[in-house]
Image (cartoon, rainbow, N blue to C red):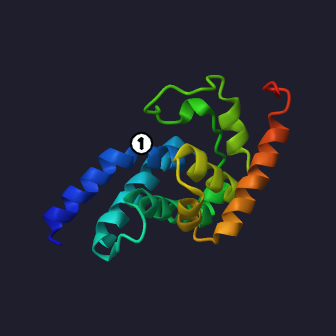
Amino acid sequence: MTDTERSREVERLMNAYGDGIKRFCALQLKDAFLAEDAAQDTFIKAWKALNTFRNDSSGKTWLMRIAVNTCRDYQRTGWFRHVERRFTPDDLPEPGQETVFPDGEVSRAIAALPGKLRMAVLLRYYQGLSLRETAVALGVSLATAKRQIAKANAMLRQSLKGWYEDE
C-alpha cells in the first residue's frame, strides 16, 4: 500500500471514527487537550500500522485498541500522575448527537470509575462495540470483559442511586 493510499484510508477512518476516538480519550484521560493529542497519536499510529491490519476485526475495533493503548501510554508517564486534572462534562468534545442526560451526572459517574472499568464502559456503551469487540479492544478475554462491564454497572448503579428512578 502506498503512502497516498494509506493517507486516504486513515482520512476515511478519521472521518468515520475521529469524534468517537476523541471523546473516548477525553473521558479516559480526563483532559480535553491531552485527549486531542492522544487522538492524533492514535491516527498517526494507525497510519504507520495500516499495512499490518489483517481485517481480523472491524476498523473501529482496531482503532479503539490503538486508542486504549495510547491512553495507557499517556497514563504511565510521570507527568500524567503529577498533574491535577479537573474534568467536567463541559470539557468533552461535542457529540455527534444530543446527549440523553444533559446534566452530566452520568459522565461524571463514568469518569469516576477505575481505569479498566471506565475503558470497558466507554468502549461498550459510548462507542457501541459488542462485548467481543470490547474484549478485543481491551486485549482481554470475553469473560473478563463481561466481568468488567458487570462490575462497572454495579458501581454506576450505586453511585447514581437516587439520581434516576428505578422502575
> Quarter holding the C terminus?
top right
Extreme residue toward the front, this view: 167
Left or right for 35, reference 56: right
| Percent x, y of residue 128 | 53, 47
| Residue at figure coordinates x 38%, y 48% from the top left | 17
Question: Residue 104: in sight, yes or no?
Answer: yes
Left or right for 44, reference 1: right
Vertically, is 6 above or below 35?
below
| Percent x, y of residue 129 | 53, 53
Left or right for 7, reference 93: left
> Quarter holding the N terminus?
bottom left
| Percent x, y of residue 43 | 35, 58
Front residue of this view, candidates 137 and 113: 137
The image quadrant that residue 7 belongs to is: bottom left
| Residue at figure coordinates x 77%, y 42% from the top left | 156
Task: Label 1: state its secondary structure.
Answer: helix
| Residue at figure coordinates x 59%, y 26% from the top left | 100
Vertically, is 108 above or below 122?
above
| Residue at figure coordinates x 64%, y 50% from the top left | 121
Question: Badge 1 is on which residue?
Answer: 19
Number of dots carrying numbers: 1
| Percent x, y of residue 23 | 50, 43
Answer few, some or many: residues within 10 Å of disc 1's Cα (few below 14, many 20 plus, some between 14 and 19): some
Q: What type is the residue that disc 1 sits on? A: Asp
Question: Residue 29: in sight, yes or no?
Answer: no
